[in-house]
Amino acid sequence: MPALSNFASDLPRLQSALGILVILLAAWLFSENRRAFPWRIAIVGIALQAAIAMLLLKVPLARDALFGLNGVVTVLTKATRDGTGFVYGFIGGGPSPFPPSVVDPARLTNFAFAILPLVIIVSALSAILWHWRILPLIVGAMAFVLRHTLGIGGAVGLGSAATVFLGNVEGSLVVRPYLPKLTRTELFVLMTTGLSVVAGTVFVVYANMLGSGCEPHHASGLHCVLPGALGHILVASMMSLPAAIVIACIMVPGKAATDVADTDSGHKYHSTMDAMAKGTTDGLSIYLQIIAILIVTTALVSIANAILGNFPDFDGGPLTLQRILGWLFAPLVWLYGVPWKEAVTAGSLLGVKTILNEFIAYSNLTALPPGSLDPRSTQIMVYAMCGFANFASVGILIAGFGTLVPERRDEIVPLALRAIVSGTMASGLTGAMIGLLPVT
């Protein structure tokens, strides 16, 4: 009987292992040349994913250092509240003019004026760190590891590593002079990487959302989704980096060996003040874009649900876009390792992330009643949704790359449309790997 009990406890991990195999098989079925399977990249890439997770989540020294970064969330959030409170008053997180007996203090803070401005702060700080040569050192180290483990060229390695911190188009600016001569495979790797990770500008925002309520005496009004959220977001993006290279090289196999002679060709600032100003401007653009997308997508979902509300109830409840997406994506999240009884709830989150964006999906995750997903399923979904693979990002990808290398636009458009599939697979591979490893 103990053996039977052990086998039952291993079933969820076997489920995730099956998911990894199915994702790799699906990538091969979508391949432009099924006879040219990149065995070395696939094996080493999967091993690198596992090594990153085990090192950062299981080795005590590395884990404690990583999760210690969550103090950064607290500091940046307080700094942002100080700024927004000064400008916007109580709706920006400043002191309330109302007595506590009149309103719920936890509901006074305005999302647009107190929480989202964190994007602007992080964008400015990232630009300063880039100018001070701190971020380039980290990006260069990551590119070195990718180049010497997966055997890819310096150009695509550097561009992919930069994408983790700068975004799906901005990261490619670092290797802009090399974009015209990148191979088709390398171009697709950059696109897939851009859609399978999230940019550094939103790391702290997502960590703030997911970790809100985890600290003692926290008055956010939200339940704790994932303790150490910033560490997990960082690990997810780092794991998705080799996953994206693996999936991209399977789907569009070929040479990926373009090297670089100059690694400082993209983001240049004349001074710290110049970096702060440009970073602030870029952050403001992202901030306004997020607000606009949130308004439009929330309205469109409301319209869709109003239309679906005219149909008869199905399976004990009214039809909604979220329920339909849950049914469609349930088999996929089951492959990641989510129990079937939670698959519809988790599938709805993944569907929202793919059709709309990960910001809405993470918001929906924080709004779920406690206990809707068990801790393991929650961690799998946080990792699997940690990417920009959605239709809006594909449009940004086409516009961005079309501007950077207009002579390759006819090649960019079809590759970008394939990249939403490869980006989703890469993030899913990360979610399944977390479900497989003994880190949850």
Image: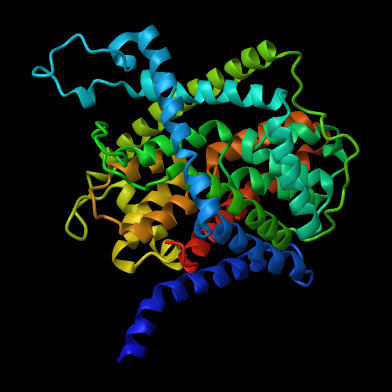
- Where residue 110 sits: x, y (%)? 31, 21
Is residue 119 visible in the rendered image? The answer is yes
Q: Is residue 32 above or below residue 143?
A: below
Q: Residue furthest front?
A: 61
Q: Residue furthest bottom?
A: 1
Q: Residue furthest left?
A: 101
Q: Is residue 194 above or below residue 426?
A: above
Is residue 386 visible in the rendered image? The answer is no
- Where residue 388 sits: x, y (%)? 55, 42
Q: Which residue corresponds to the image point at 88% horizontal and 46% vertical from the top-left?
A: 259
- Where residue 127 sits: x, y (%)? 65, 23
Left or right, 428 with respect to 273, comes to left
Splitting the image into 4 quarters, where does residue 133 fall? top right
Left or right, 292 with respect to 49, comes to left
Classify the position of the C terminus by image quarter.
Answer: bottom left
Q: How is the image coloured?
A: rainbow
Classify the position of the N terminus by image quarter.
Answer: bottom left
Splitting the image into 4 quarters, where does residue 426 fall? bottom right
- Where residue 416 sits: x, y (%)? 66, 45
Residues 314 and 128: in front is: 128
Label total for image: 0
Q: Which residue corresponds to the image point at 38% horizontal and 64% vertical from the top-left?
A: 338
Q: Which residue corresponds to the image point at 55% horizontal and 54% vertical from the top-left?
A: 56
Splitting the image into 4 quarters, where does residue 359 fall? top left
